[in-house]
Image (tube, rainbow, N blue to C red):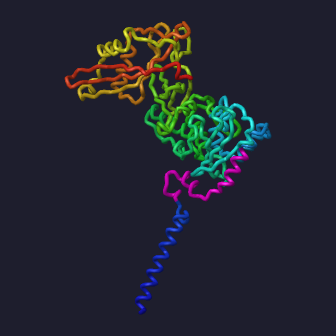
Amino acid sequence: MNRKRIILFSVLLSLALGAILFFWLRGHGRGFNTSETSGDSLAIAQDTTAIDTAADMRIIREYYVKGNNGSVSSEDGWEQLNATHLTETAIDNILMTDGDYDATIRAQEVPHNFQKTLRVVPLKGGWYMVCFKTGGESGWERIPVRMVTDKDGRRKIGYITPIDLGQTASDTIFYHHVIHIPKQHKHAVTFIEDFYRSYLSTKLTIDLDAPAYQRYLIRHFVDKKYWAEVGRHLYLNNNLIDDLVFNATPKNGWKPQYEVYVNRKSGWYGIHSQTSGVDGDHYVKVEKRGNGFIIAKFSSAPPTKGADGDESYDRWTDQQPQFAGGEAALSEYLTEQVHYPKAELEMGISAKIDVVFMVEKDGSISNIEVAADATEGFEAEAFRLLGDMPEWTPAMWNDRLVRSFVYGTLFFKVYRNGSAEVEFIRRAVNIDDND
């Protein structure tokens, strides 16, 4: 073999060995910093780091054993156990979901033979399934748990799948990062929308910075009288916003379903849940402070009281409020009375406007609210039409008259011949929704 062939052969051999080494390193995750190129750096960094599955399983098992064998009884003991086994984000989320049951075991009491039947099964992507016998009809409880590396470098439980999501073990069910609120807002509506979006994201995430950012939101955008200091944590001193977390599901892209409404007369804004069975409705008063806005007041009651000073109202009633003649008669009335916005009429623009209003005990209409995304012309006409309506037949609950909301949509329609009509479609709210 001559010298040229030897040199050529050596070069080709070097290239081949280099290519083999390159792909081997790539397959083993070495030499690539994916966290610098991905918006989901937290989750990706967790997945590409070599996971000691056996160590993760020991941590999970230790937490469930110590937390349910009676050895931890004091508040300090629980704080220490949580701090060594859960991220601060996970602790906050568990405290929020804890109600009539322990969110970590989805039960009010520790099942019989819990420790004897406790199993921790590894899944994929840092997920594990905690299994134990319940003694109930199903036989076994299975709770997905997501492990992460905390800021102190220790592996901890970063997320426990809520009971309403069953055995879902996927990173698609939470935000990888909190959503930061923009610095500037042109008006109160965009401020409310951005604040709620950001605040709720801190409740639906594994982001290790979520608790700190939640405190930032409260200190900068909520009046101090609603703050509540609990140890080193800062919380809103109400659960009005947190209730909206429970209508977030993977079916709607894991985004809480609610809508912001404007109440012109009172200056308040209504926040209404869009999910059947979740009563997260409440009201906020927004004020201009300095160069921005803050939430100055929260209320679970509508801003306008009844004629007798009654603030209460019933969403689930035996008999819903009714317009004389029903919805067909209401749509006919609205069409006869409508002053279709001139500019929209000339351009042939139709619209769908969500509305909410209260039918008082005497049948009068109050607390009219129009979805904040309505254009100015349609918003003004919706307020006028609803405000001028004749009295309704009020709602009944346990054989007595009660105040009750009506939820629905006004459909403004314009036709080629220049005629226009308005149709009202009611959104049903059944008593079974509250079960």
Q: Position of residue 130 (x, y in %)?
A: 65, 43
Give the residue drawn at x 44%, y 33%.
Answer: 187
Q: Quadrant of the N terminus?
A: bottom left
Q: Is residue 264 visible?
A: no
Is residue 365 located in the magenta-colored stretch of the structure?
no
Viewer-nearest residue: 316 or 143: 143
Looking at this view, name the residue that lies furthest to the bottom: 2
Please, is residue 249 above or below residue 331 in the view?
below
Q: State the residue at coordinates (46%, 31%).
A: 188
Residue sitting at x 52%, y 58%: 34
User: 57 or 79: nearer the eye?
Assistant: 57
| Magenta span of residues | 34-63
Residue 226, by quadrant, is top right
**239 or 295: nearer the eye?**
239
Quadrant for residue 338, please give it: top left
Q: Is residue 224 left or right of residue 254?
A: right
